[in-house]
Amino acid sequence: MLKQRTLKTQIRATGVGLHSGSKVTIVLRPAAVDTGIVFRRVDLAEPVDLRADPLLVGDTRLASCLESGGAKIATIEHLMSALAGLGIDNLYIDVDAAELPILDGSAAPFVFLLKSAGIEEQKAPKRFLRVRKTVEVKEGDKWARLDPYDGFRLDFSIAFNHPAVAQTGARVSIDFAENSYEREVARARTFGFTQDVEFMRDQGLALGGSLENAIVLDEYRVLNADGLRFADEFAKHKLLDAIGDLYIVGRPLLAAFSAHKSGHALNNQLLRALLADETAWEIVTFERADQAPSAVARLYPQAA
């Protein structure tokens, strides 16, 4: 049986919010079968739970933000990406601020935290959301699409009018059955341009951004002394974000995702369009691993 997963023990981390610039502490806690991914704002007079749900996504300026009952939690996509990459179904995330910490700007620190806590298989089948027919959303020259596929494959292309970005790979393809999320995706960092910083900070954004937690570019080049981690790090980070945004649906997808110039807003629109058409998807489980398509079985090797 392909089983649901949670953590063996709780673990905490402290960092800075990318947009708020404030200190943030998170505690990742094991959760029971079928809990899903639940963020809890513990700093409020009455703690508020915000479950990962595409219909709760509000602000998508530069990050994905869950909002409910006047409470919100922002910049969840990197942790959600790590959870998808490690196949974790059930987790509580206690947060003492309105934003998750950015850490190094990638998903790698979250992968490290999760693996340090230990991953535990649970006595219930993993529930997949299988896409049954193509769903697509468009906005000008931007688009995102989900197609039926027995596994999880992503193909993402970017287009930035910047000499340093143009020199790198503009397209990246990953199939979870063949490629390692941890080795090939998780370390790709978020990026930003110096000419945008003043405007963003006037909007109350990127107040915690620095060379320690983002790739920063001026008009011509990358300013980080250590350069890029991957030749196609810009495209890979956009793919990392998409993995996290898609996992807000609350189930691992069996689908092929493809997109051009998509971002948090369009990724969320795609999930909403998918869920709105009940003929386009179904929930499936695999009581025996050998009943699952081979690509699906390779997605989730036995938990360490």
Image: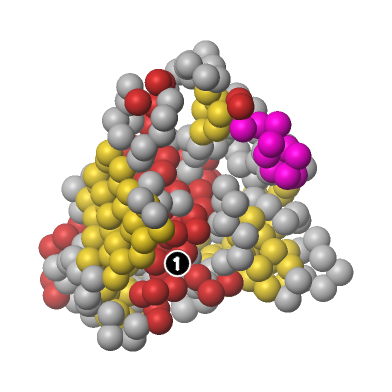
Q: Name the image quarter holding the N terminus.
A: bottom left
Q: Is residue 274 visible?
A: yes
> 140 or 233: nearer the eye?
140
Residue 35 falls within the magenta-colored stretch: no
Mark 1 element type: helix
> 186 or 220: nearer the eye?
220
Quadrant in which residue 205 is drawn: top right
Residue 107 image point, x, y percent: 48, 43
Instruction: From this view, report whether residue 171 is shown above or below residue 255.
Output: above
Query: Which color scheme did the rendering employ for the protein?
Result: secondary structure
Instruction: From this view, report whether residue 131 is shown above or below residue 8.
Output: below
Residue 78 image point, x, y percent: 51, 49
Describe residue 266's horizontal placement relative to residue 56 as left or right: left
> 121 or 99: nearer the eye?
99
Which residue occupies the extreme right position in the image? 45
Describe residue 96's horizontal placement relative to residue 278 as left or right: right
What segment carries the magenta color? 196-205
Residue 31 image point, x, y percent: 54, 70
- Write the residue at 30% across / 34% down: 170
